[in-house]
Image (cartoon, helix red, strand yellow):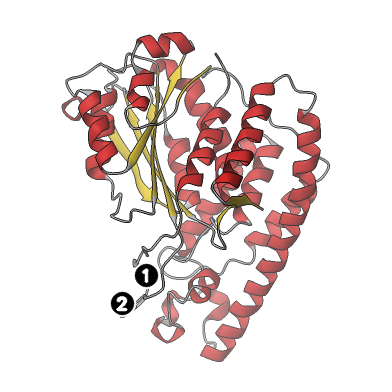
Amino acid sequence: MKTNFKLLLLVIVLASITACNAKTKNKDFALYKTEKKDSEPKNQCIKVALLLDTSNSMDGLIDQAKAQLWDLVNELSYAKCGTKKPNLEIALYEYGNDRLNSYEGYIKQVLAFSDDLDEISKELFSLTTNGGEEYCGQVIKTSLNQLNWGTNADDLKLIFIAGNEPFTQGKVNYKNVAINAKEKGITINTIFCGNYKQGIVTNWKDGADITYGDYMAINQNNKTVHIASPYDDDILLLNQKLNKTYVAYGQKGRQKTELQAEQDSNARYYSKANAVKRTVSKSSHLYKNKSWDLVDAIEQDEVDLEDIEESQLPTELKGKTEVEIKKYVTKKGEERVNIQKQIQELNAKRKEYVLNQKKNNTNNLENAMTKAIKEQAKKKKYTWN
């Protein structure tokens, strides 16, 4: 059984229908002098840890992960639990690469849980492959111990591990690790890069079954197919306008502005259609930039203008009064909302066009899974916009 990396995307979305009502809040507030008290429960958080084999044979897997990040983000951005939209945090590990520390099991935490989509994209594009030993049990154990999974029982906690060597390699017993994950409310999903039956024989399916996760097999060398639409050019023009609504401040401002542009370029590297998908992600509630953008920071009440020193303001706001600054930021926020609305409207037409194109596609498995996900979501009282 072979399909492409989009199977991972669909399984993550299916898994996300099982929980709601998050109660945690990230309190790492830039430029805030005093810690704010938060008595209001926050939306559910979907936490996804991606454990990717970066040995020599996995170039195709890494390429698919880079190309399809925005499919994942967009699919999850439409999910709702009641009236709330869940947040998303992604962590990234690489393993099985000779350049990594052998003492630590050829394992590296590339990124801890983060909701910074630009940073996630950057780290995905930093991955390169090299031969090595692949210890599935050990990398899962490492992610369980290192990551902040939180104590909120309503959070959805998922591990997705991908590779092509026997699941039993290494000194750490995967069964013990899986039992530990199950006790913590973390579900392990396994993606074997190769023949479906071979993945079963080499214990990849068993690694998922223990936590009631999903096992799947993919052809890691399949190229991602991006379908162009008549709406792509207009959406990309709106992306340029959207970028101009960001008001960078503080030490991170310039660096993050450059990072945003860099990830736009990385998405475009694969295709125009992939750049469009990233633009759609940037128009969703999952694209958060409160640490460097005044519009997001003030809207979310994470900073107070009185606490910001003039040296941390962009050139266009230096020497301005607090009232003038607030007026400027408010205007940029209104422009952003309008642009994001236009992107979403065009994307609705784009999705319909792409769906019609896919009707002639031979990938019937993908269509069948999408239908199944929607039906099961209704039973769980989840809806998609």
Q: Which residue is mark 1?
A: 29
Closer to the chain start, of discs 1 and 2, is 1
Residue 121 visible in the displayed image: no
Q: Is residue 316 above or below residue 109?
A: below
The three-letter code of the residue at mark 2 reads Glu
The picture quadrant where one finds residue 232 is top right
Quarter-wise, where is residue 276 in the image? top right
The type of residue carrying mark 1 is: Phe
- The location of residue 138, given as percent across then percent down, is 23, 28
Which residue does the image show at 43% across and 41% down from the upper left?
123
Tell me the element at label 1.
loop
Residues tagged 1 and 2 counted as in contact (Cβ below 8 A): yes
Residue 49 coordinates in the image, percent (x, y): 38, 40
Q: How many marks?
A: 2
- Please give the name of the residue rendered at 54% of the width and 35% of the height, measured from the top-left corner: 9
Q: Which residue is mark 2?
A: 35
Q: Nearer the viewer, residue 136 or 339?
A: 136
- Judge whether 219 appears above or below 179 on screen: above
